Amino acid sequence: MTVRPPTLRGRHRKARGMTLLEIMISLAVLSMMVVSVYSSFSGTLRGMEAAEEIQLRHSIVRNGIARMTSEISMAYLSFNRPLDDQRHYTFFEGRDSFEKDDLSFSAFAHMRVRRDSNESDQSIIQYFLQQDPKDASRTHLYRRESRRLTGDRPEDMHQFFPAYVLIEDVKAFDVKYWDNRRIEWVDEWATMRLDMQPDRLPQRVKIRVGIQDTDGKLIYFTAQTVLKMQERIDLAKGV
């Protein structure tokens, strides 16, 4: 029996590659796989960026609150002033305005960084909410410091000392004061008024700061601090 060798046409039929339709189907499947992988990776990356932005935002708020609690804990009052001077060089005044409170107090909180500068470790510090001067839709928590005791009233300090943003985009700033005599939290504190809390500090201060999250909801951060120097300084005592 004689075996005939395959013809040239038969060899071409067996060695034939993919058709154009098969190539197009393969490319379509590959494209869908690439798009699926890219969408998954892109969504994960956006989620990571959003989480990182939220964490950074919350970290800034916590750092600002930590600074406030540290400075408030160093608040103090003093009897010492010139006999003929009626100004209050040391005071603690917290004014209530729903969730837009403001607080001014004297403290041993200022750090001198320049030699022979007209500054002291004793200063007046203020915290308050105010609109951004360039964008009225934004409200920030500001900090003002006198860098020395001047005897100026809290409402007049803006004329002499600048204020800086402590925490951006704050919607609420609420402060409560623990009155050890009444055994309750109170909304206001004023050491310069005889009908309030003359010449005494609150034992504790509670701060609540509200910011808006990406969904438009308010998130509150709360902290408390203890005022350590409850007794007024009197250098003439015992003389």
Image: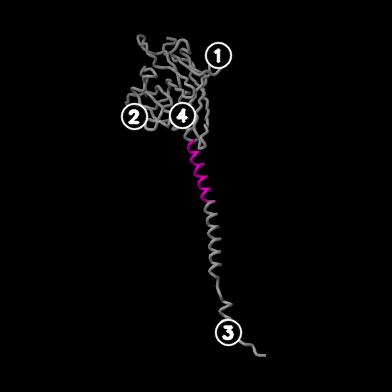
Q: Earlier in the sequence, mark 2 or mark 1?
A: 2
For the residues bearing labels 4 and 1, Cβ distance under 8 angstroms? no
Q: Earlier in the sequence, mark 3 or mark 4?
A: 3
Give the secondary structure at mark 1. Answer: loop
Q: Earlier in the sequence, mark 1 or mark 3?
A: 3
Residue type beneath disc 1: Arg
Reading the image, the residue beneath label 3 is 7
Reading the image, the residue beneath label 4 is 67
Residue 126 placement (x, y as % from top left): 42, 23
For the residues bearing labels 3 and 2, Cβ distance under 8 angstroms? no
Give the secondary structure at mark 2. Answer: loop
Residue type beneath disc 4: Arg
Q: Quadrant of the C terminus?
A: top left
Q: CA distance from mark 2 to mark 1?
A: 44 Å
Residue type beneath disc 2: Arg
Q: Which residues are magenta?
A: 40-57
Q: Quadrant of the N terminus?
A: bottom right
Question: Which of the numbered marks, if any, corresponds to residue 218?
Answer: none
Camera-side mark, 3 or 4:
3
Reading the image, the residue beneath label 2 is 114
Residue 39 placement (x, y as % from top left): 53, 51
Question: Which of the numbered marks, if any, corresponds to residue 182?
Answer: 1
Residue type beneath disc 3: Thr
Q: Earlier in the sequence, mark 3 or mark 2?
A: 3
